[in-house]
Image: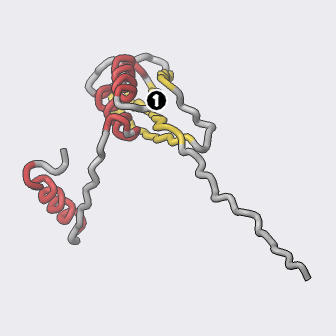
Amino acid sequence: MVIGRKGSEIDKLKEELSKMTGKEIYVDIMEIKSPEIDAQLVAENVALQLERRVSFRRAMKKALQTAKDFGADGIKIRCAGRLGGAELPGSRSITGGRVPLHTLRANIDYGFAEANTVYGKLGVKCWICKGENKPQKKEQQQPATIELGAN
C-alpha cells in the first residue's frame, strides 16, 4: 500500500515530510507478513469501517472471523462510544477463542484506534492471542563426581 509502483509513493512521502520539517528524511518500511492477525491493523480496519457507517456488529464479527481463519488462537474486540448513533454511550465486546490476559507467557498483541464519526468518536481496542511462549528448560547440570583414591 505504501510502496506503490517502483517505490514512487515512498519518494512522494519523503518529499512531503522534508518540506514539512525542512530536513532530509529517511523512510524505512517494514513489511507485515500477515496483516489479518496484527492487532493494530485489525483495530484500524474496524475503525475505518465504523467511519464508513458499517454496522459495528458486522465489522467486529468479520474481523474476528478473518483473524481466526488466519490462525490466531483467540481474538477480543471492544468498541465503545455512541455505537450506532445511540444517545447514550456504551461499549460492546466480542470474543472468539482464548485470550488469556492474565497469563504472562501468552503472546498477546494489542491495538487501539479511534473512529471519527458524525455523532462523535468511537474507540476500538483489539487483543489477539498468537499462542504461548513456552518456557525454555535450562540445561541440567550434572553433579560433580569426586574420585577417591585408595591411599
Could you tell me which quadrant the C terminus lies in?
bottom right
Would you call the spot at circle 1 few (<14 residues within 10 Å), some (14-19), or many (20 or more)? many
Judge left or right: residue 80 versus residue 45.
right
Residue at 18%, 61% (x, y): give it.
14
* Residue drawn 50% across the image and 40% down it: 108
Residue at image location 47% in from the left, 29% down from the top: 74
Q: What residue is shown with label 1? A: 75
Residue 148 position, x and y percent, is 86, 76
Query: Which quarter of the figure has residue 70?
Result: top left
Q: Residue at x 64, y 57 (%)?
A: 138
> Is 53 rendered above or below residue 18?
above
Q: Which residue is situated farthest in the bottom direction here?
A: 151
* Quadrant assignment, res 35: top left
Percent position of residue 6, x then y: 8, 54
* Above or below for 53 versus 32: above
> In the figure, 14 relative to 105: above or below?
below
Which x, y percent locates residue 147? 81, 74
- Disc 1 residue type (three-letter): Ile
Task: In this rendered view, identify the residue nearer to me: 142 or 83.
Answer: 142
Quadrant location of the N terminus in the rendered image: top left
Furthest-right residue in this view: 151
Residue 27 in which image quadrant:
bottom left
Residue 134 in the image: state x and y as whole percent.
56, 45
In the picture, measured across the screen, residue 43 lies left or right of residue 78, that is: left
Residue closer to the observer: 122 or 69: 69
Does dot 1 land on a helix, a strand or a loop? strand
Question: How many numbered marks appear?
Answer: 1
Asked whether 1 or 15 is in front, the reply is 1
